[in-house]
Image: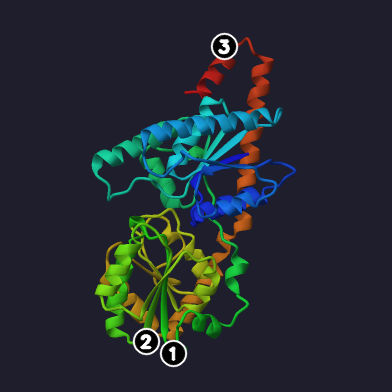
Amino acid sequence: MIHIITMLELGGAQQNTLHTVSHLDRARFRPYLIAGEGGILDPEARALDDVPFFPLPDLRREILPHRDLLALGQIRSRIRAIVRANPGRVAIVHTHSSKAGILGRWAAWLERVPVIVHTFHGFGFHEGQGRPVRWVFETAERLTGRITHAFIMVSRANMEKARRLGIAPVERMTLIRSGIPIEEFLEVEERREEIRASLGVGPDEALVTMVACLKPQKAPLDFVEVARRVASQEPRARFLLAGDGVLRGRVEEAASSCGLEGRFQLLGWRRDIPRILHASDVLVLTSRWEGLPRVLPQAMAAGLPVVATSVDGSPEAVEDGVNGFLVLPGQVEAMASRVLALLRDPDLRRRMGEEGRARVGEFDIGRMVVQQEELYAKLASSSLDGHRRCRRWSRSENCRLSVRGRRS
């Protein structure tokens, strides 16, 4: 059972991958992990005693043809060694993220791995890209989809998009939600007042929080603009942004130019998200595109109302007007007005928070692992059945066509 992901950054796909390999049933699966070298979660991967971890120097997020070819060779070499070390077991390669999804699946196909699975935690292409660039990415996904035996989708919206674009056929797609450890977000050990004090937030202040990587997909500059508009009308409002990334400098500059000094904190990467959410009053997410962002069920479990953009799978977690509000991406004025409405109405915040908690069970991380195990077992069984049939009728044309078809 070989999981491949581009980089072990501090994100939902990466954390769920680590959780999966560390919690798979060892009586049925022997997990391995391959990732690009230098991720913030690399130490956690190395700490997993019974999960061999192989960081690759040339597997990077950027498109670099020379290094990508080297990474393809490195992945092939690792897969080949793992398969040889496990004779008699059905090899399964499960890829995550765009770059590892392309390179990992082709490496598995070239090594004749019988079961290839890919999870779309979102897509590597989006409306903001130029048409030629987007066409290249979509074409790469369509071609790679032909050698993929099963697709795990985190949202129905992504399932429909993959079907419409010809990336994956319906019969090979399975909906498995990106899970969270719900219990960690239901309660925290510290009192809310103590957590707020540690963050420099006063007891009478209203705290608006966003948790996201600072990259174009998450549109953190929109959050700064939302903060500016809310702050101009609500003197009690304070703002936290937990995350880091390439747009950090621009976020800091924008917050300063908006006059938000002392009211806007950029926390960087944080590992205490349950604490931060329990200290907050409203969770905001300004994403331009998504799979289904993990922070939404996290906020739901913490009893927080959400104000988010209605992109991709987000409406499958947040129902507009029920456990939060949804607006179109980029509509910062509408988002600011929803935040103000929540800050000024404690009863509305409470009702929406309770509704979110009542709906969060679908996103349990234990359920996610069990659903993946069931899919792996089904695919492995089908692969074994096909192999036995081919051995039984090895001289038949049907078998030769069947084997040829797996490579087409």
Look at label 3 and name its amino acid: Glu
Whether residue 222 sits left or right of residue 118 in the image: it is left
Within-10-Å neighbours for mark 1: few <14, some 14–19, many 20+: few
Task: Assign a secondary structure to mark 3.
Answer: helix
Mark carried by residue 204: 1
Task: Assign a secondary structure to mark 2.
Answer: loop
Q: Earlier in the sequence, mark 1 or mark 3?
A: 1
Within-10-Å neighbours for mark 2: few <14, some 14–19, many 20+: some
**Which residue shows up at 43% across the image and 43% down it?**
60
**Which residue shows up at 42% across the image and 35% down it?**
68
Whether residue 46 sits left or right of residue 259 in the image: it is right
Give the foreground label among 2 and 3: 2
Q: Earlier in the sequence, mark 2 or mark 1?
A: 1
Evaluate whether residue 267 shows in this view: yes
Mark carried by residue 397: 3
Alpha carbon separation for disc pair 1 and 3? 77 Å
